[in-house]
Image (cartoon, rainbow, N blue to C red):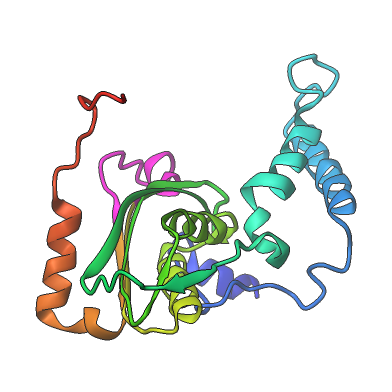
Amino acid sequence: MINKIDEIGDDHVGSSAKTPLRADAFDISDAEKRARIEASVRDILDTLGMDLEDDSIKGTPRRVAKAYVNEIFSGLNPANKPKLSTFDNNYKYGEMLVEKNITVYSTCEHHLLPIVGRAHVAYISNGNVIGLSKMNRIVDYYAKRPQVQERLTMQVVQALQKAMGTKDVACVIDAKHLCVNSRGVRDIVSSTVTSEFGGKFKEKDVKREFLDYIKMDTNFDNIEVQ
């Protein structure tokens, strides 16, 4: 196992399209998880030589544990998955619908450092439509877990395909990885782009239309709210 880890090194290698969870992942409560993580973070800080009696950091283990379970990795728990209710497309809208610039906050599973970027999601209705906010919520749900960007992109598409009963779903994510920006090569300029195209979005013209939409300038800073 050690040799395999050494061989992979700092490379970003994904195991599968499914998040690697053990079968017993939810056998203990969130409260127990927070207690265990708090103890582990305390041990890490102590090993690093930090003074855990200092007012500034003595609450850090508890804060980190709460953030991990309740926020940063809350997408691991299926109980937190948003309900993806669909509705009949009564107004017969037949073109693609694009939700662009969805904020992505995730965590690289190799170094547990942030991934920050934007997702652009689209679908073509086959008779059903879905609430716009649900597209944002499904991105957020799958982002809130240790991730690789390729898997996140695929999971968003697969979840929407299942909910809407259509293969005609696409997702493009452009994100910065702090494991690249803040350590290793420390390249603060580069970003990573991943895509997943299903159904009609694999067709050249449809794919081109989607990519053109997400390049459109949508700066609403000067719009006044009445």
**Can I make out residue 95 in this image?**
yes
Q: Is residue 212 left or right of residue 39?
A: left
Identify whether 59 is placed above or below 33. Answer: above
Identify whether 22 is placed above or below 149. Answer: below
Q: Is residue 144 left or right of residue 198?
A: right
Q: Residue furthest top?
A: 55
Rendering coords of residue 187 (x, y %): 30, 42
Rendering coords of residue 109 (x, y %): 56, 59
Q: Quadrant of residue 84?
A: bottom right
Please tell me which residue is depicted at 11% across the width and 70% down the height of the picture: 208
Q: Quadrant of residue 83?
A: bottom right
**Can I make out residue 176 in this image?**
no
| Segment colored magenta | 175-192
Q: Is residue 26 left or right of residue 133?
A: right
Is residue 183 inside the magenta stretch?
Answer: yes
Please tell me which residue is depicted at 51% across the width and 54% down the height of the picture: 140
Is residue 37 inside the magenta stretch?
Answer: no
